[in-house]
Image: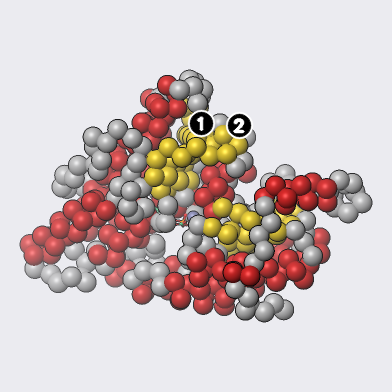
Amino acid sequence: MLILNKTAGVFFKPSKRKVYEFLRSFNFHPGTLFLHKIVLGIETSCDDTAAAVVDETGNVLGEAIHSQTEVHLKTGGIVPAVAQQLHRDNIQRIVQEALSASRISPSDLSAIATTIKPGLALSLGVGLSFSLQLVGQLKKPFIPIHHMEAHALTIRLTNKVEFPFLVLLISGGHCLLALVQGVSDFLLLGKSLDIAPGDMLDKVARRLSLIKHPECSTMSGGKAIEHLAKQGNRFHFDIKPPLHHAKNCDFSFTGLQQVTNKRIMKKEKEEGIEEGQVLSSAADIAATVQHTMACHIVKRTHRAILFCKQRDLLPQNNAVLVASGGVASNFYVRRALEILTNATQCTLLCPPPRLCTDNGIMIA
Ligand code: KG4
Ligand code: ZN
């Protein structure tokens, strides 16, 4: 049906305002053309090919997703060209599945929304090219979506959350704290100075060869760490949370990864095993890393809450903290954030785990 050979470079990107104006005028006479606005969302920014059909009231009419996790686990990380090929192999099927599940004919769509940034250029390009073809064929408006804004706003699908609220986005590619003042009005309060927490967990999981662990072989690095940590002792060794004295809301995870690597090497020597085999103390290491990461995330978030309250950027009582992104599906991190929000008279809201990781619903 669709030829996926156009590059993102030839893509004409209308301004968001123009798209919204067009959409509004498009639905000016409800009942004549559409009863509801129905949007197809397409996500290919990293290693998930995802699509969903959502109506204007937030009802998910159809959804489909293809995860590349298993393939990337085998190659020890995401190889962009491999991710690109897998997106190409799957995008048409995934979009078709989402549309079929929704029972919406493509001609009844009001618009097509697609992630345009940030992400892996090769992966983003597949979603963009596909959408460009579809938009052209169906003569539908296009809505360019910022991946992180989509993560930040997903909570409004499941909860009635008013602006402003604080958002903590923690995933494999991103780590930021921002004040959300409107649909596309974000005040960035802090970000990672190096890698994202999910990236750190993925690297630690790889170094621990958790793919060879019978219970974790199909899990992402972060999920494998969470799973093993339940069986481990988090005080197995002591690591100071990073940026202890920094008077801002920034994050850092490279140091934690390096200290953990050193600890793994030491343990390998002690246990007399080679790199590539699973340590008997892998669960303790997982628990310690997860605990230190959670402490760091909570401390930086605490600073952001105090900053916003001092400047009346957030209400003094019942301010909302939204935690989203793949790492926010971690229940240990969630529990730690809950302790923080209880202590600061805030409310913690997290989308359900399947909406925390990449998906088409948040784009639609
Ligand atoms: O949001 P996401 O699906 O993709 C982006 O990075 O945008 O997040 C994927 C990341 C991976 O690094 C993965 O290891 C991590 O989220 N992750 C987790 C958990 N599930 C996925 N990290 C900690 N605990 C989990 N349960
Ligand atoms: Zn994401």
Residue 320 is marked as: 1
Give the camera-side residue of 265 and 218. Answer: 265
Residue at the image point whose x is 54% and y is 65% from the top = 124
Q: How is the image coloured?
A: secondary structure
Q: Quadrant of residue 93?
A: bottom right
Give the camera-side residue of 363 and 289. Answer: 363
Residue at the image point whose x is 59% and y is 32% from the top = 163
Count of numbered labels shown in the rendering? 2
What x and y, as percent, mark residue 121?
A: 50, 66
Relative to 296, is 273 above or below?
below
Residue at the image point whose x is 53% and y is 33% from the top = 165
Q: Is residue 255 left or right of residue 159?
A: left
Tell me which amino acid carries mark 2.
Glu
Circle 2: element type? loop
Relative to 159, is 40 above or below?
below
| N-term mark: 1 or 2 | 2
User: In which quadrant of this rendering is ligand 1 seen?
Assistant: bottom left
Q: Quadrant of residue 126?
A: bottom right
What x and y, as percent, mark residue 229?
A: 29, 51
Check if mark 1's residue and mark 2's residue have beta carbons within 8 Å: yes
Quadrant where the C terminus sits is: bottom right
